[in-house]
Image: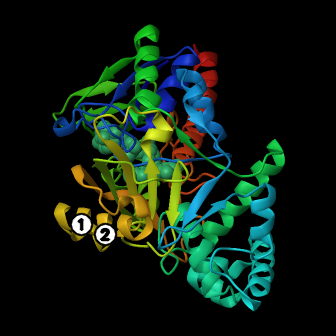
Amino acid sequence: MHCVVVGGGLAGLASAVWLSEAGHRVTLLERRGSLGGRTIAMPVAAVDDVPDNGQHVFASGYQHLMRYLDSVGTRKYVEFPGHMTIRLPGGGTRVSAFGGVAGLRAAFGDLPGVTGLDRLRTARAQITLIRQAIRQPAWLDDITADDWFRRIKMPQSARDALWDGIVIGLTGDKPDITSAKVPADLLVTGIRRARETKTPISIGYPTVDLNTLFVDGAEKLFADAGVDIRYRAVVSAVDVAGGAVVGVTLVDGERVSADAVICAVPVWSVRGLLDQVPEHERIYAAIEQLTPVPIVSVNLYLDRSIGMADWGEILLGGEGTLEQVWDRQRMHGRDASRHHLYSTTVSAAYELTNKTNTEITDIQMNQLRRYFPGAAHAEVVHSHVVRMPKSTFAQRPGTAGIRPDQRTSVQGLALAGDWTRTDWTTTMEGACQSAARAVEVILEHARRFDARL
Ligand SMILES: Cc1cc2nc3c(=O)[nH]c(=O)nc-3n(C[C@H](O)[C@H](O)[C@H](O)COP(=O)(O)OP(=O)(O)OC[C@H]3O[C@@H](n4cnc5c(N)ncnc54)[C@H](O)[C@@H]3O)c2cc1C
């Protein structure tokens, strides 16, 4: 079959790779001049470097993403060190891990800044939280994560130390916005994967830039397999005739015919593309409710080391200004003779995103100096601020089950992308799992297609 994949982010890349592995002829249409979507490296001439658009971390349950890395030959570039560090103002640190002694201590409420009776209250609230996440009471999707924490009497100190950060990390959005069901579902997915693989949940990171990790291997595979990649090809409609997909139309009016199509554009680009799909009104109504969340990432090139204790550190109390710092020397084995690169992340950065680059850099340098004694006299060599107003999407209360399935009512048409229905929220794994499911729909169609020939 001739399969057209629309969109060259992770969902589209994985779809194109797996369809071509299955022996189909593939054309990949990408609106931009390069592949990678929201996971890319960007050249910064001022420092002659190619940093990422933002730190991307992996969870140990990312099985479809790992399958993609196996396909493109880059799995060797992901490490799971099994720990991160929590840093307190003034420079104190505490290793954080889900397994081993640190995990056990956390389970008993022994978290940084949680003292006295609050430890007992934390341990009790955590048991209730896990139990409710597993049992999934119907009201979970009626309330926010913030309401949930209040309901189970999670002490504020434990929220500051761990739980608010987990919600922001897992859902990409603030606890007072996101539906409680989103972190609950993710906890259950994580626990299930940990049981299946018999390994504790842990967080990992790429040891190379995102282009090397996701794009270069795919491009080589496409060249070898004869996949036709068309850049700056903006699709305006998926074409349907007699209940089956027949191709796509580009904005300049060109038609590309196809036996099968996977539409892997992000949620904010879907409207208009699916007008000929019978259920398009339901899909468009759903996407209205998946609202964009901004992330601000900064690649800070400093004149010296700030003395990080770990590859990634979560700053306790840094919400909204400087939540996580990543040591690119340690992670990528970078040569630090010219400068030291620290990448920073602020999720759900609704306020920070409206500030100027200078303001953002000043705010973050002040925070670094508060938390890292080694940063006291550090000077900024260059600051590369990346604002992405549409980084991830929020799922507010009342949105459970609205994300559409990969399968459509149109023969030969499947949807993919982190916003379609998966076991995950807006993540790289969600994108790859959606691709695996979309490809499965198309392969089923191919079997019927073969039978007709
Ligand atoms: C700063 C940042 C940090 C993140 N951190 C993490 C993290 O730590 N862990 C994690 O798991 N996830 C993280 N994410 C989320 C993750 O990057 C995304 O969920 C994932 O990359 C989405 O992939 P996708 O293929 O669904 O969409 P996209 O990557 O958005 O790809 C869609 C592609 O479709 C193209 N397109 C759009 N419209 C058209 C059209 N009409 N015609 C042709 N092409 C079109 C776009 O140009 C784009 O290339 C982060 C995201 C950001 C931005």
In the rendered image, is residue 281 in sight?
A: no
**Mark 2 highlights which residue?**
366
- Residue drawn at x 47%, y 33% is 333
- Residue drawn at x 79%, y 79% is 123
- Residue drawn at x 55%, y 25% is 18
- In the image, residue 162 sits, relative to residue 144, either above or below, namely above
Q: Which of 110 and 434 is in front in this view?
A: 110
Is the shortest distance between ligand 1 and the CB of mark 1 under 8 Å?
Answer: no
Residue 141 found in image quarter: bottom right
Q: Which of 179 and 388 is in front in this view?
A: 388
Is the C terminus in the top left, top right, bottom left or bottom right quadrant? top right
Residue 242 found in image quarter: top left
In the rendered image, is residue 118 in sight?
A: yes
Residue type highlighted by circle 2: Asn
Residue type highlighted by circle 1: Asp
Left or right: where does residue 423 sit relative to residue 320?
right
Residue 164, percent across and down?
Answer: 56, 74
Residue 46, percent across and down?
Answer: 16, 39
Q: Do the residues labelled 2 and 1 touch (CB within 8 Å)?
A: yes
**Mark 1 highlights which residue?**
362
- In the image, residue 273 sits, relative to residue 435, either above or below, namely below
Q: What element carries label 1?
A: helix
Q: Which of 183 and 124 is in front in this view?
A: 124
Disc 1 packing (10 Å; few <14; some 14–19; many ≥20): some
Residue 105, percent across and down?
Answer: 78, 68
Residue 43, percent across and down?
Answer: 24, 35
